[in-house]
Image (spheres, rainbow, N blue to C red):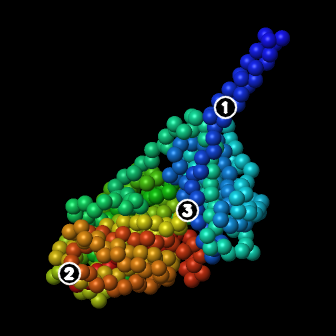
Amino acid sequence: MFLRLFHVLLVVAFVASGWASSAEAARWIRITQHQIDPQAQEELIDLRKARGSFIGFRLRARRGAVAVDSYVLNFHDKTKHEGGQPFRLRSGERTRIIARDEGERFPESLSVKYQQDRPSERYTRIEVWGLQSRQGRRAQRPEKLMAVPPPPGRVVQPVAEPSSNDTVLIAAQEIEREVKSGALDVADKLGKFKRLRLAVRDNDVQLETLTVRFDDGSKKDFTVEEPLLQNSSTPWFEIDPSKFIEKVSLSFREPTNLTSPTRIELYGTHSDGWLASDGEGKSFNDGWILLGAQTAGFIGFDNDVIPLADHGDGFAKIRVNVRGRAITLNQLRVIYVNGEEDIIPVRSRIDAGDTYGPIALRGAPAQVREIRARYRSRVIDKVIDTRGPALVQVWAKR
């Protein structure tokens, strides 16, 4: 009798041990939580900071109800999982397991479309949870190519010694699927530049030629020998620094075959003397000179760094110009070369084509090392017909 009871207890202990091992092998991890914009019809939630890979996912509502019309879960390997059936989650409720797969996958983003008649609750959050195995917890996200010039980092870094920076983001454009050509329009009299380069952000692109068109009607063609890989850039192209650029036309070797729009960015180096106090730049744009720019993402609010080109003996005031689409601007921090800073609370919508400022600089003329901004592109902008993010520019005047 005692021996039989011992065998039964041994079996129970073995089974319990198996359950415990299984529970330890895969567990639920909250990847992120996102506060929903009650006015947004669609939002994109960034999942690239998730550590490791996952074998399943679920969504959970928190602090309010969530009414989803459809969603797309995008992965690092360009695959995706689409949920086309509308559903509602009350606060605390969660979905069934979605995108369950035998393989390990790295999530990139979650695109969510909300139901039109959903109630607008101010503090509702949607959480993304992932089912992660022991192997997934150890997995490393594949490295991505990152060639110069990458966009300035989204994470604010401690103030360091001022360093030389002569590269400015001039223009940015979303390139759609199955096109053979494209163009980046440059604002009138934006500045004069002695060299240019292109960067591609979201997909590989087979670029063939690049044509720089100047405002006097002349042009200069360049051939791009190598394919542009995701997050890489072309070599520098030397151009005539005495002319203003009107646009840069692009020709592709074959129609783009992209799973999503690709952002092409145009960078330039100012012509010699353009930024000097006695330079040519003061003769245009009522004396305002472009010092730096950055694109504003759609995912929550970016705490962004906009590095500024070296500008000699400084300026008296700055302003922020917005191109492409409207942004919501929450804060500006002006970081001077001596490490001091001014914090300017804004909390304002700025439409495309509008300006915030001017802002008087302390101890003018002052040298500013960078601008740190908290902003995001407006997802819905009925005035501007563009899918791309806003271009936020920092201008200065003596």
Give the mark nearest the N terminus, 2 or 1: 1
Q: State which mark lies toward you, 2 or 1.
A: 1
Quarter that holds the C terminus: bottom left
Residue underneath mark 2: 363
In the image as oriented, which residue stretches furthest toward the bottom? 286
Residue underneath mark 1: 20
Residue type pointed to by label 2:
Gly
Residue 308, x across and y down, in percent: 29, 70
Residue appearing at x 26%, y 81% in the figure: 361
Residue underneath mark 3: 261
In the image as oriented, which residue stretches furthest toward the right? 1
Residue appearing at x 49%, y 68% in the figure: 301
Give the mark nearest the N terminus, 3 or 1: 1
Quarter that holds the N terminus: top right
Q: Nearer the viewer, residue 237 or 171?
A: 171
- Report if the CB atoms under discs 3 and 1 are less than 8 Å apart: no
Report, in whole angstroms, how far the alpha carbon at label 3 lies from the one at label 1.
45 Å
SS for tag 1? helix
Q: State which mark lies toward you, 3 or 2.
A: 2
**Residue 15, quarter of picture:** top right
Q: In this view, does 176 lie to the left or right of 398?
A: right
SS for tag 3? loop
Q: Nearer the viewer, residue 220 or 107?
A: 107
Residue type pointed to by label 3:
Pro
Residue 68 circle label? none
Report, in whole angstroms, how far the alpha carbon at label 3 lies from the one at label 2.
44 Å
Residue 9, x across and y down, in percent: 76, 20
Number of residue marks: 3
Q: Nearer the viewer, residue 274 or 80?
A: 80
